[in-house]
Image (tube, coloured by chain):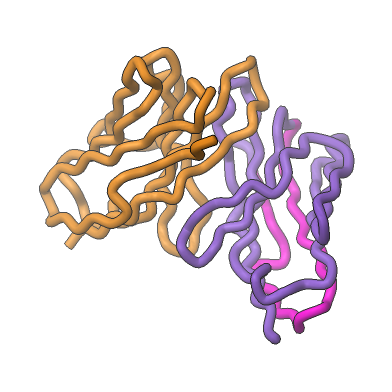
Amino acid sequence: GIQVEQSPPDLILQEGANSTLRCNFSDSVNNLQWFHQNPWGQLINLFYIPSGTKQNGRLSATTVATERYSLLYISSSQTTDSGVYFCAVEQGGYSTLTFGKGTMLLVSP
Amino acid sequence: DAGVTQSPTHLIKTRGQQVTLRCSPKSGHDTVSWYQQALGQGPQFIFQYYEEEERQRGNFPDRFSGHQFPNYSSELNVNALLLGDSALYLCASSYFRDHGDEQYFGPGTRLTVT
């Protein structure tokens, strides 16, 4: 099956810093989503981005499908950005997601 | 617009027992998928229901079964619980168009097996 690798596995930032999270995948995909999992376990949709670039406030994402990677940018980080960020991809036509292992982000005041 | 809801929030069961978890999809969605998330891991796909039938299944034993009702809500049943079944169980819903549908997740049910 498809492999999804996220880096870095852990990231510690000071409030106000910028960061880039990376997601590499091993095969072509129909869909790529970025999620933020809060401390209570809720997966919050950040981006649905099978290709191209999108921006939402301080967050933006870019997927280069031909090179099989996606990047999530977080600017001016806040303590509420802490949590685990997951990249998930779908291939094969039934909208079932394969997740990476996540990047654990801790933003300190 | 109601999002995906799941019940119960937490559950504690004993080895060998059976458990049923419930999910109501986001309004307008017709497809429900279930995922298991062990501590420190990403969610793993269990199975997906569409038109009241299991459409696709991940690498999980037959102890894991499910159902989808005419109103698109779904249940996940696990029989003969093992300690290793302790995890966060997540339900996701989407509207089936062909492929690449955006998935929305519920808050999860945290199952502890003792």
In the rendered structure, which segment of residues is drawn in magenta?
Answer: A3-28
Determine the residue positioned at 11% across, 47% down: B17
Residue at 50% from the left image edge and 58% from the top image edge: B41
Is residue A25 visible to the viewer in this orientation of the structure? yes
- On screen, residue B72 versus residue A42, left or right, reads left
Could you tell me which residue is drawn at 80 percent across and 48 percent down? A70
Rendered-image quadrant of the N terminus of chain A: top right
Q: Position of residue A65 (x, y in %)?
A: 83, 36
Q: How many numbered discs?
A: 0
Quadrant assignment, res B95: top right
Depth check: A64 or B10 in front?
Answer: B10
- Of all residues shown, which one is farthest toward the front? B1
Task: Give left or right: position of B13 versus A77.
Answer: left
Q: Colour of chain A?
A: purple
Quadrant hosting residue A38? bottom right
Q: Which one is nearer the viewer's eye here, B108 or B57?
A: B108
Q: Is residue A16 magenta?
A: yes
Residue A71 makes an appearance in the image: no
Q: Quadrant of the C terminus of chain A?
A: bottom right
Give chain B's shade: orange
Give the side of residue A93 with respect to residue B52, left or right: right
| Residue B58 location (% of width, % of height) | 44, 33
Report x, y in % for residue A30. 71, 28
Quarter holding residue A85: bottom right
Q: Is residue B41 above or below residue B31?
A: below
Q: Tell me if residue A51 is in the magenta stretch.
A: no
Q: Is residue A53 above or below residue B67?
A: below
**A49, B73: nearer the viewer:** B73
Q: Main secondary structure of the magenta part?
A: strand
- Does residue A104 lie above or below B112 as drawn? below
Across and down, in percent, residue B47 comes to 41, 30
